[in-house]
Image (cartoon, rainbow, N blue to C red):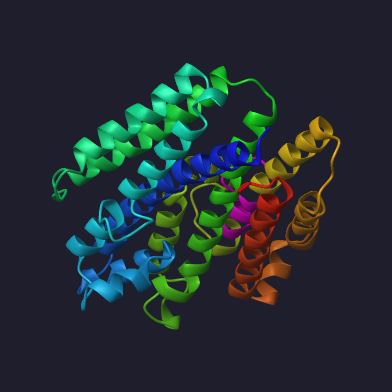
């Protein structure tokens, strides 16, 4: 496969995953803002930081407000990570690699762009926001279903899955990190009812509420939630699950191509370094330090994959 094709598949999947993650994050922002007794607009600063778009927002707006934050993350053309922007980029990459996709996958990606473009012709008001976010998640699920249901399990499939799980692991890591360093108003909130409500919102933001309760019951304890989102091998958005899938798909590529690049070694090292430990050890080290190091190494792995498979040649 041409490196340019591999890169198109990888980034198509990353952008689609990013759109869904951003939609979930916006839903979480709405819920968390309701837990504030005053100045709920300030809550949106944490949402912007989680999404990694606070700097761009601050360059355009002097103050944080819900309306501006939502529009920035949904559709602002100045934000390359807005949902509208990344879905357009996903569609552009899909068009670049259209011959590698099944008809169902291409149609789903193309339909997603057309529906989102139509829904975001103008600012989305508060009344229409839940429906718009639901549309984004439904369309992401449609593309994922078409991919799983119609694509051959070959190198094309592997590159799409690697892109998905690199982006997903990055998102879960960012949400966990921002929880401790941004979301809580003060250190005195740890263990309070506010803290518990926010942890519940974190679970919902990654679609993990039901799975957590099946595993741990109704109590939302920070250590158990962190364990679930980091180390649980069954939770499809946990760091462990994502890293294992990246390892699997890289190993399939190695067998197909007869080439074991540095990215395979890097993926194995990432898993061994961060996932072969107990949650108590992670908290002793410091959750923030652990997540920051993980995200740095995950970014290095992503860049190594691009080099190994010559995405831009």
Percent across and percent down for residue 66 are: 21, 63
Q: Would you place residue 195 above or below residue 238 in this image?
A: below
Q: Which residue: 56% across, 60% down?
A: 173
* Magenta part of the chain: 226-240
Left or right of 165 in this view: 48: left
Q: From the viewer's side, name the closer residue of 59 and 217.
A: 59
Q: Residue at x 57, y 42 (%)?
A: 10
For the question of whether residue 273 can be seen, the reply is yes
Judge whether residue 229 is colored magenta. yes
The number of callouts visible is 0
Q: Is residue 176 left or right of residue 91?
A: right
Q: Nearer the viewer, residue 215 or 282?
A: 282
Q: Quadrant of the N terminus?
A: top right
Q: Quadrant of residue 270?
A: bottom right
Residue drawn 26% across the image and 69% down it:
36
Q: Position of residue 171 (x, y in %)?
A: 51, 55
Query: Is 64 placed above or below 135 here?
Result: below
Q: Position of residue 229 (x, y in %)?
A: 58, 53
Answer above or below: position of 227 versus 164.
Answer: below
Give the image quarter of residue 55.
bottom left
Which residue extends farthest bottom?
A: 187
Look at the image and tell me whether residue 207 can be seen. no
Return the residue nearer the eye: 283 or 214: 283
9 magenta-colored: no
Q: Which percent across, then down, holds residue 150? A: 55, 17
Please state which of residues 63 and 104 is positioned toward the viewer in this rendering: 104
């Amino acid at each position: 496969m041409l490196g340019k094709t591999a890169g198109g598949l990888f980034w198509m999947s990353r952008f689609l995953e990013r759109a869904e993650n951003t939609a979930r994050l916006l839903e979480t922002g709405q819920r968390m803002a309701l837990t504030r007794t005053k100045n709920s607009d300030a809550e949106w600063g944490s949402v912007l930081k989680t999404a990694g778009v606070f700097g761009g927002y601050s360059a355009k707006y002097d103050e944080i407000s819900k309306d501006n934050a939502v529009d920035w993350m949904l559709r602002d053309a100045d934000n390359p990570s807005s949902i509208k922007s990344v879905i357009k980029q996903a569609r552009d990459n899909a068009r670049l690699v259209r011959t590698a996709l099944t008809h169902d996958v291409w149609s789903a990606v193309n339909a997603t762009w057309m529906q989102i473009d139509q829904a975001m012709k103008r600012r989305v008001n508060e009344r229409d926001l839940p429906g718009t976010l639901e549309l984004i998640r439904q369309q992401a699920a449609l593309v994922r279903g078409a991919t799983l249901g119609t694509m051959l399990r070959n190198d094309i499939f592997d590159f799409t899955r690697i892109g998905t799980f690199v982006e997903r692991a990055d998102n879960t890591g960012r949400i966990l990190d921002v929880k401790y360093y941004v979301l809580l108003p003060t250190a005195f909130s740890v263990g309070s009812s506010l803290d518990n409500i926010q942890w519940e919102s974190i679970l919902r933001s990654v679609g993990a509420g039901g799975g957590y309760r099946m595993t741990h019951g109704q109590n939302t304890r920070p250590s158990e939630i962190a364990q679930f989102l980091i180390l649980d091998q069954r939770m499809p958005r946990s760091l462990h699950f994502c890293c294992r899938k990246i390892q699997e798909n890289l190993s399939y590529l190695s067998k197909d191509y007869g080439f074991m690049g540095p990215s395979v070694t890097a993926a194995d090292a990432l898993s061994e370094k961060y996932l072969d430990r107990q949650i108590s050890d992670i908290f002793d080290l410091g959750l923030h330090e652990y997540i920051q190091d993980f995200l740095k190494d995950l970014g290095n792995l992503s860049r190594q994959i691009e080099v190994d498979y010559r995405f831009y040649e």
